[in-house]
Image (cartoon, grey):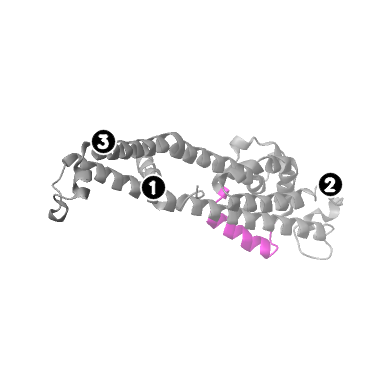
Amino acid sequence: MTKSNIGVIERLSILREPKERKLLVAVILAFLSLVIIELQLPLLPVLSDTFMGQILCSDGTKNISTGLLIGLISAYIFYILIDYLPRKRRDKKTIELLDSLISSILDAYVRCRIFGHETAISHVDKSTLNESWLNDQKTILKNNNSKFLPLKFAMQTAYTRIEDFRHTLPLAVSLSPEHALQWLIIIDKIRLMAESYGEEVNIPREVQHLVDLDIEDNPIRLYKSTLNLRFLEIVEQADAWLKLTQSATNKSIRPR
């Protein structure tokens, strides 16, 4: 899909929002009424030579009606240019920022780097925040088939980023109450993952090859299972966030 097509779709988003659609219909009706007044169409025969007909044909009525309708149409144009379009751009950038923050945890898990938690938020890979990948990971995590090192690096990133998640709550609030609620849930799941930081059990060299096996001889079996569960919860809530933001894009960020 080209950028021009995306731009057209974004402009047509106003037709998918109930409030904006009602405003647009009202303005269209006002414009049609203005056209009818300016055309000075003849009165219906039933209104000819009546008091109501005289009022409708008077210059005062025409001037007042024309002024009100022009004012209404002008106000709507200013609303679109000054409020609606800037707000939509701001909401889009806000979602992109929050998506990047969630992706930082997923990115640390996928790329499995020792210093992955130090990756700048602008350089994380957001391709993991998609429904297909998240569903695949949910299956792996529910079967407890995850690897320890990716979970460890995701935990380190959660520990590093927990304050960032908390401080960006006002951004989620600015989108809608639904976004704020989902972001609070995500914060809670990130916090639980971060609390596992520093609890790691010492792993003797001779049993390091067992860390990814779900057997009794695994010295970190319970610890890894905890990380697996915490990361599964993060993935599930990331999927819920993705569906919420996609729904907001298809409909509206919030009724205003």
- Residue tagged by mark 3? 63
Q: Image point 66% across, 48% down: which residue?
A: 109
Residue 172 location in percent, x, y? 61, 45
The secondary element bearing badge 1 is classed as helix
CA gap between label 1 and label 2 equals 56 Å
For disc 1, the marked residue is 23
* Region in magenta: 128-146
**Secondary structure state at the residue bearing disc 2:** loop
Amino acid on which the number 2 mark rests in the picture: Gly
Q: Is residue 109 left or right of residue 31?
A: right
Q: Which residue is mark 2?
A: 198
Alpha carbon distance from label 2 to label 3? 76 Å
Quick check: can you spot residue 36? no
Q: Identify the mark nearer the N-term, 3 or 1.
A: 1
Queried whether the magenta region covers residue 130, the answer comes back as yes
Q: Amino acid at mark 1?
A: Leu
Using the image as rendered, state which of residue 230 and residue 113 is in the foreground: 230
Q: Amino acid at mark 3?
A: Asn
Between circles 3 and 1, the one closer to the viewer is 3
